[in-house]
Image (cartoon, helix red, strand yellow):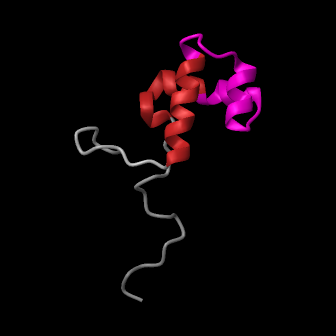
Amino acid sequence: MTNLQEGIWMSKKGQVTFDTVSEFLRGELSRLEAATLLQASERTVSRIARRIEKNGIMGVVHGNRGRAPVNKSPDLL
C-alpha cells in the first residue's frame, strides 16, 4: 500500500469522488445529491462512504494499485 508520507496520486475524478462523499458523510449533501453529482447510484455512494470511513482517502484508490497483475509473464521470456 502507498506510504502516506510519499503522497497519494489520484485522478481528478478520484479527488472529486473523495470530496463529494466526504460532504455526504459530514451531512452537507444527501445520498441522492452525492449520487447525482458523481453520476452513480445511491448504493455506490454508500459503498464508497464505508470504504472512506474505514480507510480514509485510500478508500477511493483502487485496491490493486501497486500490485503486479496475477497473469503477468515472467521477465525472463
| Residue lying furthest bottom | 77
The range drawn in magenta is 25-48
For the N terminus, the image quarter is: top left
> x and y percent of residue 54 in the render?
48, 23
For the residue pair 19 and 54, the one nearer the viewer reads as: 19
Residue 63 appearing in the image: no
| Residue lying furthest top | 27
As drawn, is 6 to the left or to the right of 72? left
For the residue pair 2 and 10, the one nearer the viewer reads as: 10
Residue plotted at (36% across, 86% down): 76
> x and y percent of residue 47 in the render?
64, 28
Residue plotted at (56% across, 45% down): 13
Can you say whether 56 is above or below 62 in the image? above
Residue plotted at (56% across, 16% down): 25
Q: Quadrant of residue 51?
A: top right
> x and y percent of residue 24 in the render?
60, 18
Residue plotted at (43% across, 27% down): 56
For the C terminus, the image quarter is: bottom left
As drawn, is 56 to the left or to the right of 32? left
| Residue lying furthest left | 5
Residue 47 counted in the magenta span = yes
Please state the total of marks drawn on the protein image: 0
> x and y percent of residue 65 in the render?
45, 52
Q: Quadrant of residue 57?
A: top left
As drawn, is 12 to the left or to the right of 66? right
Residue 37 appearing in the image: yes
Residue 15 counted in the magenta span = no
Overall secondary structure of the magenta section: helix
